């Protein structure tokens, strides 16, 4: 499994606020099953909910990961 996904999953499992979060649980299920279509649907739903276009959301995620891992 991708190391970044492992970190994300471990973070979710270690934090009670995320462990009890429905979206975080959906993310874990998608990662564990490898369901790309379901992952794309979750991403689209989140973009619509927060009023982001997918390219901006992807860029924000990349920037956040770079900051988190000091890359």
Image (tube, helix red, strand yellow):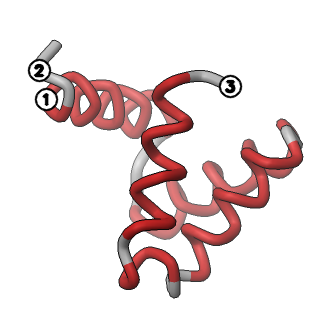
Tell me: residue 30, above or below residue 14: above
Calculate the distance from the C-alpha at mark 3 to the C-alpha at mark 2. 21 Å
Left or right? Give the position of 45 relative to 62: right
Of residue 46 and residue 61, the one placed in the foreground of this image is: 61
Q: Residue at x 64, y 71 (%)?
A: 25
Circle 3 is placed at which residue position? 1
Q: Residue at x 23, y 36 (%)?
A: 64
Q: Residue at x 28, y 35 (%)?
A: 60
Tell me: residue 54, above or below residue 22: above
- Tell me the number on the disc at residue 54: none
The image quadrant where one finds the N terminus is top right
Mark 3 or mark 1: which comes first in sequence? Answer: 3
Q: Residue at x 60, y 81 (%)?
A: 22
Circle 1 is placed at which residue position? 67
Mark 3 or mark 2: which comes first in sequence? Answer: 3
The single residue placed furthest to the top in the displayed view is 71
Tell me: residue 65, above or below residue 38: above
Circle 2 is placed at which residue position? 70
Callout 1: SS: helix
- Tag 1 and tag 2, C-beta contact below 8 Å: yes
Callout 3: SS: loop
Residue 34 lies in quadrant: top right
Calculate the distance from the C-alpha at mark 3 to the C-alpha at mark 1. 22 Å
């Amino acid at each position: 499994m991708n190391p970044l996904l492992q970190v994300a999953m471990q973070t979710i499992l270690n934090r009670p606020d995320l462990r009890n979060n429905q979206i975080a649980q959906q993310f874990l299920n998608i990662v564990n099953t490898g369901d790309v279509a379901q992952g794309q649907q979750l991403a689209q739903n989140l973009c619509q909910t927060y009023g982001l276009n997918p390219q901006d959301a992807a860029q924000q995620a990349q920037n956040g990961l770079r900051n988190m891992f000091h890359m």
